[in-house]
């Protein structure tokens, strides 16, 4: 398995006796174990999953490539005694996920090596199995958008729309929404992360819906903006600029570009129309076991896009006091360019 080869290279490169993995997504990625608590200890010879009594049967069943070790005391205490019993001395840990108390305890007993983003980098390139799950999560989001357009009416609150949308995704097989659903209507559209509120959606509002589904641990993330009743010429113009920026990005971004170069494709379109200052976030992000993962598509990103990465493309324009528009699709990077995974229409609907 490629992922374990890469872990072995990491052990070698950092001269580690073991890698300790405690974050939920990395633990799941490497072992398939979906429980809420536990740790992986991976050495050159062996792979161990340690968890408590609640997960004895589940851990042994899901983490086929790992030997299950029952946690007899607190997790950290059990990890320390187990690693001591195996004579492990130099331990790599996830620097960005381990808290200070855990670090202090570990450093008393071992020679600890903080690592950053090592498993996340392995997660960058999706396997075909992972891609199938993301595609299913995207299908659920697409079908739910089609449905919600038939449901939204002036007079409803944003929260009513969110609840109906999330219930619909669940009815299609999602285990839940992949993040707190954004429903930002009218002037609230200027809030890029305007999670649904009790604001009533009014005639003449534009509504930005940003939502996604979890499917078997994998996320989708889609945004569409539509109008209720009517659309002002000003907002229609903004919509068309965002759409042009988004379509150009989908068309031109390809493997070999950096995240910064990709971001610039979208940003240049919006800046040329005088709205540069109204596009204050990055173009997109990686998507998988987390809604936001590597690679970033931003002015700060030096990471190069490679086939198999899954990313979002989500330019937006936000004007205080007026409103906002964002359009977002999920796509996989291929040798030939981006292949879109979300397919909802981007026509400006007026419901
Ligand atoms: N969909 C929310 C975000 O990407 O930030
Ligand atoms: Mn997103």
Image (cartoon, rainbow, N blue to C red):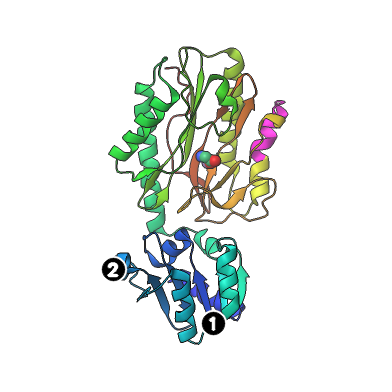
Secondary structure of the residue carrying tag 1 is: loop
Q: Residues within 10 Å of mark 2 (few under 14, many from 20)?
A: some
Is residue 205 or residue 102 the one in the foreground?
Answer: 102
* Residue at the front extreme of this rendering: 73
**In the picture shown, does residue 144 fall above or below 20?**
above
What residue is at 40 percent from the left and 19 percent from the top? 156
Name the image quarter holding the C terminus. Answer: top left
Residue 11 position in % (x across, y down) = 55, 78
Residue 219 position in % (x across, y down) = 43, 47
The number of numbered badges drawn on the structure is: 2
What residue is at 62 percent from the left and 15 percent from the top? 234
Is residue 19 or residue 258 the one in the foreground?
Answer: 19
Between marks 1 and 2, how big is the CA–CA gap? 26 Å
Secondary structure of the residue carrying tag 2 is: helix
- The answer to whether one can see residue 350 in this image is yes
The label shown at residue 17 is 1
**In the picture shown, does residue 1 fall above or below 294?**
below
Quarter location, residue 316: top right
Residue 223 position in % (x across, y down) = 49, 34
Name the image quarter holding the N terminus. Answer: bottom left
| Badge 1 or badge 2: first in the primary sequence | 1
The label shown at residue 81 is none
Residue designated by label 2: 61
What residue is at 48 percent from the left and 21 percent from the top? 199
Residue 220 position in % (x across, y down) = 44, 44
**In the picture shown, does residue 75 fall above or below 271?**
below
Residues in magenta, as a range: 265-275
Whether residue 71 appears in magenta in the rendering, the answer is: no
What residue is at 35 percent from the left and 40 percent from the top? 140
Q: How crowded is mark 1: few (under 14 residues within 10 Å), some or many (20 or more)?
A: many
Quarter location, residue 176: top left
């Amino acid at each position: 398995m490629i992922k374990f080869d890469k872990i072995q290279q990491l052990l070698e490169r950092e001269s580690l006796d073991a890698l300790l993995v405690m974050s939920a997504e990395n633990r799941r990625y490497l072992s398939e174990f979906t429980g809420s608590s536990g740790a992986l200890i991976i050495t050159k010879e062996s792979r161990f999953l340690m968890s408590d009594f609640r997960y004895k049967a589940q851990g042994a069943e899901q983490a086929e490539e790992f030997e299950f070790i029952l946690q007899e005391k607190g997790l950290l205490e059990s990890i320390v005694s187990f690693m001591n019993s195996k004579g492990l001395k130099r331990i790599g840990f996830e620097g960005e996920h381990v808290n200070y108390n855990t670090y202090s305890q570990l450093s008393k007993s071992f020679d600890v090596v903080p690592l950053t983003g090592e498993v996340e980098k392995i997660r960058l390139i999706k396997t075909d199995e992972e891609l199938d799950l993301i595609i299913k999560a995207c299908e659920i989001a697409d079908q739910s958008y089609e449905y919600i357009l038939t449901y939204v009416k002036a007079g409803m609150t944003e929260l009513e729309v969110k609840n109906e949308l999330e219930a619909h995704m669940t009815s299609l097989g999602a285990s839940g929404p992949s993040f707190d659903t954004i429903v930002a209507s009218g002037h609230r559209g200027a809030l890029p992360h305007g999670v649904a509120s009790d604001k009533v959606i009014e005639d003449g509002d534009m509504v930005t819906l940003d939502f996604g589904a979890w499917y078997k641990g994998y996320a989708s993330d889609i945004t569409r903006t539509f109008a209720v009743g009517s659309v002002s010429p000003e907002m229609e113009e903004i919509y068309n600029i965002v759409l042009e920026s988004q379509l150009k990005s989908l068309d031109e971004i390809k493997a070999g570009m950096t995240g910064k170069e990709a971001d610039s494709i979208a940003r240049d379109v919006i800046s040329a129309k005088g709205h540069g200052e109204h596009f204050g976030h990055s173009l997109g992000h990686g998507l998988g076991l987390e809604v936001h993962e590597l690679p970033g598509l931003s002015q700060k990103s030096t990471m190069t896009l490679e086939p198999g990465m899954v990313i979002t493309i989500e330019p937006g324009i936000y004007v205080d006091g007026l409103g906002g528009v964002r359009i977002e699709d999920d796509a996989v990077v291929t040798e030939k360019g981006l292949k879109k995974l979300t397919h909802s229409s981007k026509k400006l609907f007026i419901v």
